[in-house]
Amino acid sequence: MKLHELHDNEGATKSKKRKARGPGSGKGKMAGRGIKGQKSRSGVAINGYEGGQMPLYQRLPKRGFNPRNPSKHAVVNILVLQKFIDAGKIDAKKPITEDSLIECGLVRRKLDGVRLLAKGELTSKIDITVTGASKGAVEAVEKAGGKVTVA
């Protein structure tokens, strides 16, 4: 085999359509765009338009309410809080605030506040101040003899 004998398999390459290159090309004059109108011009894309058929985004059902700027909270579960107390990273005798949770590394950043959730079990008596807390989390903390303050 020599270099000049190399070639593609049959049908592997296909020459591109040469639009607007005369009547012999089969796509001459108007290059398959038809006569006049918006779609015959350059730089036009009619997004979401389906030729008079009801567009997909209008056919699908819409439910509920989506706020423009939803609040995002940093989430802390009781289980993880207890692990940090057991490891000695958080002092359960001192009041726990959102800033102390960031300092110990339990929360990376506040966002719109810290929310306490009830996953897991709490054995330590703690006094914690957070932006929000679930009912189960408040019950769990009070059951262990602590107090939750929602700011």
Image (cartoon, grey):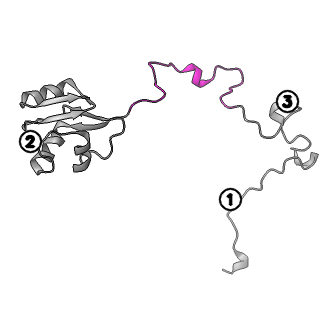
For marks 1 and 2 on the same chain, the one whose residue lies earlier in the sequence:
1
Region of the chain picked out in magenta, as a range: 47-71
Q: Residue furthest bottom?
A: 2
Q: Quadrant of the C terminus?
A: top left
| Crowd around label 2: few <14 · some 14–19 · many ≥20 (10 Å) | few
Q: Position of residue 147 (x, y in %)?
A: 13, 30
Q: Relative to 103, say whether 132 is above or below.
A: above
Q: Relative to 41, say whether 18 is above or below.
A: below
Quarter residue 38 falls in: top right
- State the residue position of label 2: 93
For marks 3 and 2 on the same chain, the one whose residue lies earlier in the sequence:
3
Q: CA distance from mark 1 to mark 2?
A: 75 Å
Let me know if residue 64 is in the magenta part: yes
Q: Secondary structure at mark 3?
A: loop
Please give the name of the residue rendered at 80% of the width and 50% of the height, measured from the top-left corner: 17
Q: Position of residue 60 (x, y in %)?
A: 53, 21
- State the residue position of label 1: 12
Amino acid carrying mark 2 in the image: Lys
Amino acid carrying mark 1 in the image: Ala
